[in-house]
Amino acid sequence: MSLLKAATAVRENAYAPYSRFKVGAALRSTAGNIYVGANVENVAYPEGTCAEAGAIAAMCAGGEYQIAELLVISDSPMPVTPCGGCRQKIAEFAGPDVVVTMINLEGKTSVVTVADLLPGSFSAAHMANVNDA
Ligand code: THU
């Protein structure tokens, strides 16, 4: 199954009664498996989780920790972009050259890399001076 098909399908399962903005995400691991996620909101608004976070959690639950490619889809006027927190979450499991495809329901598409999304990202290398880091 393609990432587009997988993300489009899982988007329908988003729980977004507050924003009414359903988002689907699908990623392919370096092992070639597809993991999906949709946003899950909460009446305590900050407790909601993004589609990308769900897909990443599913990948880790599957015992995989390397993203090869990621796609995110929503019903937005322009291709939906991952929020700041999700950019950091993606960078945890994807190298700077990993391709992120952002798309809306009309098919308007934007293709970028993880480095494009989060230039100069904070990484474990910044903690190199800490003993045992
Ligand atoms: N959202 C995502 O799931 N992913 C994105 O890339 C952007 C925003 C969700 C969070 C919230 O449930 C809703 O969209 C509106 O912000």
Image: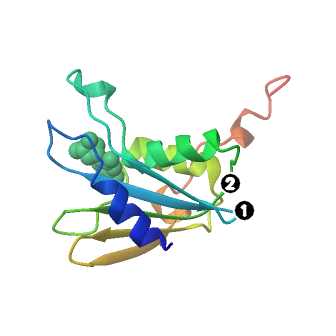
Q: Which residue is mark 2?
A: 66
Please determine whether, in this image, residue 6 is positioned above or below residue 59: below
Please determine whether, in this image, residue 2 is positioned above or below residue 50: below
Mark positioned earlier in the residue sequence (1 or 2): 1
Q: Is residue 101 visible to the viewer in this orientation of the structure?
A: no
What residue do we see at 26% from left, 78% from top?
Answer: 108
The residue type indicated by label 1 comes to Ala
Please determine whether, in this image, residue 48 is positioned above or below residue 64: above
Instruction: Report, in whole angstroms, how far the alpha carbon at label 1 lies from the one at label 2.
Output: 8 Å
Percent of width and height locating residue 26: 47, 59
User: For the view shown, which residue lies furthest in the right direction?
Assistant: 132
Is residue 39 shown left or right of residue 16? right
Name the secondary structure under disc 1. loop
Q: How many marks?
A: 2
What residue do we see at 46% from left, 43% from top?
Answer: 53
The residue type indicated by label 2 comes to Gln
Is residue 14 shown left or right of residue 31? left
Percent of width and height locating residue 36: 47, 53
Q: Residues within 10 Å of mark 1 (few under 14, many from 20)?
A: few
Percent of width and height locating residue 130: 79, 25
What residue do we see at 58% from left, 50% from top?
Answer: 91
Q: Residues within 10 Å of mark 2 (few under 14, many from 20)?
A: some
Q: Is residue 16 visible to the viewer in this orientation of the structure?
A: yes
Name the secondary structure under disc 2. loop
Q: Are marks 1 and 2 in contact (CB under 8 Å)?
A: yes
- In which quadrant of the rendered image does the C terminus lie? top right
Please determine whether, in this image, residue 46 is positioned above or below residue 64: above
Render colour scheme: rainbow
Q: Which residue is mark 1?
A: 31
Residue 86 found in image quarter: top left
